[in-house]
Image (cartoon, helix red, strand yellow):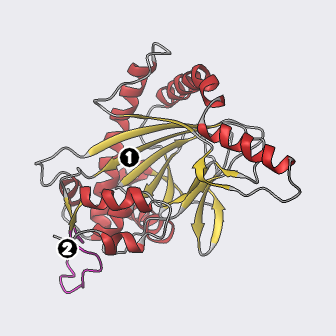
Amino acid sequence: MAIPVIDFSKLEGKERAETLARIANGCQEWGFFQLVHHGIPVELLERVKKVCSECYRLRAEGFKGSKPVQLLHKLVEEEEGDATDAKRLDNVDWEDVFLLQDDNEWPANPPEFRETMEEYREELRKLAEKVMEVMDENLGFEKGTIKNAFSGNGEHQPFFGTKVSHYPPCPRLDLVNGLRAHTDAGGVILLFQDDQVGGLQILKDGQWIDVQPVANAIVINTGDQIEVLSNGRYKSVWHRVLTTSDGNRRSIASFYNPSLKATIAPGTNNDASATALYPKYVFGDYMDVYVKQKFSAKEPRFAAVKAV
């Protein structure tokens, strides 16, 4: 099984209806799909790869002294001193990571990092809003419904953050995850993944399936808030990253999420008789629950969040 790969440019031509249907299928049956011909210049994507890889090269020594590395070394030492098998490190990820937002501190080097990533983030923001409009159409919502929900009908600024990660080679694949299995808390996630080193998997029908690297594609996945707004028609999907022994996986994930002050509830379409399957709540209250339960079953999160 392969994750659906969809030509986004065909929305503008005679294959629009078929393309809308393929995106709807990606949202409903997979929760993940890959967009090609999405409008982001390949030249810009090449610059993003270059500056992020160079940025990690400058940070690599720091990872060698990080908590995951220290804990793994300790575990291996304990294993060597004992005949019993070592336990897995279930509470850490083998990941070097930092977050880019409009108002936080960015790496100063390489010098072209900020300009390149600002340009890239603006392109991703526009693509996210186009994808949300497609979801609106497929769900029978008025155009702009999801964006308006995320902004509290324009009263608040939606969150847009970019997580720059690298998963360095790991000496013990049996003892630690690259990134533990979870669903994403927010809205629409846009991933520019490594096109050489795999490792990302999604859980579908009880099986872990590889998200195959596709050059210059943007991987889209739906977060918990899209599941709520769609009243369960679209599901947020469990995913994880495996460690590798012979590759340094680059992963650049951008998150278009509701404002913490936005109120989220199942949306309304032509089927006004449909029963709401999720509560109505403030997104910030959901995040308070999520940070404590990110790696646990998601259904109890919806039950635990304070309804409004």
Q: Is residue 122 left or right of residue 39?
A: left
Q: Label 2 sits on what residue type?
A: Thr
Residue 203, located in which quarter of the rendered image?
bottom right
- Neighbour tally class for label 2: few under 14, some 14-19, many 20 plus, Cα within 10 Å: some
Up-down: is 278 above or below 119? Answer: below
Helix, strand or loop at mark 1: strand
Up-down: is 219 above or below 208? Answer: above
List the single residue furthest toward the top.
111
Q: Quadrant of the N terminus?
A: bottom right
Residue that label 1 marks = 255
Residue 90, located in which quarter of the rendered image?
bottom right
Helix, strand or loop at mark 2: loop
Residue 15 in sight: no
Q: Is residue 165 magenta?
A: no
- Neighbour tally class for label 1: few under 14, some 14-19, many 20 plus, Cα within 10 Å: many
Q: Is residue 279 magenta?
A: yes
Percent across and percent down for residue 270 are 19, 78
Q: CA distance from mark 2 to mark 1?
A: 24 Å
Report the span colored magenta.
265-280
- Which residue is painted at 76% across and 54% down in the image? 174
Q: Earlier in the sequence, mark 2 or mark 1?
A: 1
Q: Quadrant of the C terminus?
A: bottom left
The mark closer to the camera, 2 or 1, is 1
Residue that label 2 marks = 268
Residue 171 in sight: yes
Percent across and percent down for residue 266 are 24, 72
Pointers 2 and 1 in contact (C-beta within 8 Å): no
Q: Is residue 156 left or right of residue 215?
A: left
Percent across and percent down for residue 125 are 32, 40
Secondary structure mostly taken by the magenta-highlighted segment of the chain: loop
Percent across and percent down for residue 252 are 50, 39
